[in-house]
Image: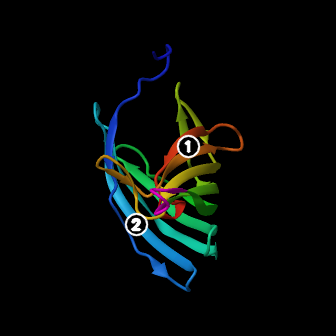
Amino acid sequence: VRPPGQPKTSPNLSANPGLWLDVPVPRRFTLRPFVAAGWGAVLNGDDSAWTYWGGVHSRFLLTEDSPRLALINSVGFVGYTPQNGASENFLPLVTALELRHPFVAIRDGKDRLRLHWHAAHTHFHGQLDLNRPGGVTEKISEQWEAGIAVSRQNGRLRLGWLSFDRFGFAYRFSSDGQLEGIGLVFNSLFDE
């Protein structure tokens, strides 16, 4: 039930195909430039927008053996151009640590589950606004994230016809308490 005076939400649909390229620099360091563009629309209205983003991810393996510890960084450019209105954009800057280690043997010791932990900080440079019910808009300047997931050492996790690199949960929040949520984890932060 929607409280009186709050705007009704509208379903929307969008598609954002992208391309990326892995560039191994030295043995333990990988760069991944990426670019994506797409279009989205409100299903029961006339609003639509072009969306675009690009940038580069990097991963440096601090340790290669088990447990494996990686430093992940990312800089990007995200923007959109609505059908009616001015274009807006922002720059997300991400720094993260990911830790992977064996967890428990499965299938008579022929395979192992691995446990993945991550902690990340994202600084949003530019205009990132969070639209709240009642027409209130709040500027978000940063986000923290802590997550945990499991994966198989020999293969992917499968659920029927679905296949995942890993599965877990992440808790996201901003320092000022304006942003808080729980997300699902299906891959490394380096792959997002």
* Circle 2 Cα neighbour tier, 10 Å, few/some/many (<14 / 14–19 / ≥20): some
Q: Which residue is mark 1?
A: 129
Q: Amino acid at mark 2?
A: Val
Q: Amino acid at mark 1?
A: Asp
Q: Is residue 107 magenta?
A: yes
Q: Which residue is mark 2?
A: 35
State the residue in front, 4 or 98: 98
Considering every residue shown, the one lying at the far front of the view is: 108
Numbered tag placed on residue 53 in the rendering:
none
Looking at the picture, does residue 148 appear above or below residue 94? above
Q: Secondary structure at mark 2?
A: strand
Q: Tell me which colouring the rendered structure shows.
A: rainbow
State the residue in front, 84 or 60: 60
Q: Secondary structure at mark 1?
A: strand
- Residue 175 screen position, x and y as percent: 71, 44
State the residue in front, 169 or 24: 169
Residue at (31%, 46%) from the top-left corner? Answer: 160
Considering every residue shown, the one lying at the far top of the view is: 4
Specify the segment rendered in magenta. 105-111
Q: CA distance from mark 1 to mark 2?
A: 22 Å
Looking at the picture, does residue 108 appear above or below residue 183? below
Q: Is residue 86 magenta?
A: no
